[in-house]
Amino acid sequence: MSITSRIDAITRLDEERGCETPPVPRSVKIELTARCDARCFFCASQARLRKKGDMDWLLYRRLAREVRELGVEELGLFYLGVSFLCDWLPEAIGFAKQECGYPYVFLTTNGRLATPDRVEACLRAGLDSLKFSFNFSGATQFHETTGVKISAYQDVISNIRAARDVRNRVEKSTGKCCGLYASSIRYDGAQQARMTAAVARIAPYLDEHYWLPLCGQAGFTNGARGTRPAPGNPGRVGALRKPVPCWSLFTAGHITYDGGLSACCFDHDGRFRMGDLRQELFMDAWHSAGFRQLRAAHLKEDVRGTACERCIACE
């Protein structure tokens, strides 16, 4: 199955899941770390609206096993942080694949720390999908947008290219093939033309590339640097979804490094926290009163007065 097919399946809200108490999600993300090595203007992570730390290894093991036993099939080992900052990332992948039996373990990275040796360790541990968030047409824009030194842009390009060689080497020795992908924010006019050219330079090293709309990150970055984001999280370009009801509340789980279950893809300040998985079971939090009330508002397509109101304010 292609990565875009998987994305479309998660962002598609069907009748079975379009209710206040949907069944266990097929896909869950666990945040190994909330730390990030960049300060992108279009991401609210740089505002540090919540404490940033790393997940406890024992908590990770318990949660990964618990949600797999519930029937979760796809495990993402990231959320709002950069998981290559976590020293035990390969061990987390290996535990998910070998001890828990997840059919599909995936990871997204900005690419700067995805060095060949780190990528190889992840692939040998059993990683099924590695996606690069590639949103800059050149070194100058990369530096101006992220605040990271200008030379790091070439590091990202080199790491993407090297990942293909690493993947081929690991596949040859183990028979296991990890998909290599990239996504990019779709801009307008001249910037989009520059991005298209930049993507063309890395496309030969990827299995698939797709475009995403610029999101306002739950209202945190609406209008940043004059941009006009899409309301909500509509999924990928080519299969855009309505902002309300938002698929994220019904089809995917998001677990923060400190055990919070969030209702949002962009919970930078904790206002979407629906439960504490250090103290309660996943399904109890998934069907908590707060979660049910928020889903009910979405199903009525009226989120005024809820935590989601700011997210669609740009509509």
Image (cartoon, grey):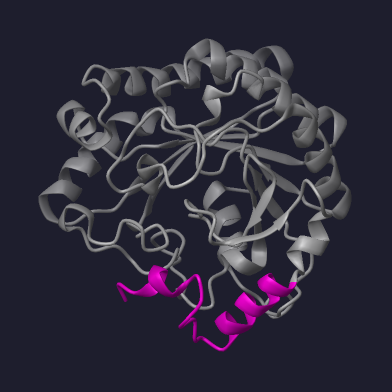
Q: Position of residue 93 (x, y in %)?
A: 71, 28
Q: Residue furthest left?
A: 190
- Tell me, yes or no, if residue 123 can be seen here: no
Residue depicted at x 41% and y 24%: 160
Residue depicted at x 27% and y 25%: 148
Which of the 4 image quarters holds residue 75? top right
Left or right? Give the position of 219 relative to 225. right
Using the image as rendered, state which of residue 106 and residue 294 is in the foreground: 294
Q: Position of residue 306 (x, y in %)?
A: 51, 76
Q: Which quadrant of the rendered structure holds the C terminus?
A: bottom left
**Residue 112 located within the stretch drawn in magenta:** no
Above or below: residue 164 compared with residue 286: above
Highlighted magenta segment, given as a residue range: 289-315
Above or below: residue 85 compared with residue 199: above
Above or below: residue 199 compared with residue 296: above
Q: Position of residue 153 (x, y in %)?
A: 27, 23
**Residue 294 located within the stretch drawn in magenta:** yes
Residue depicted at x 36% and y 47%: 43
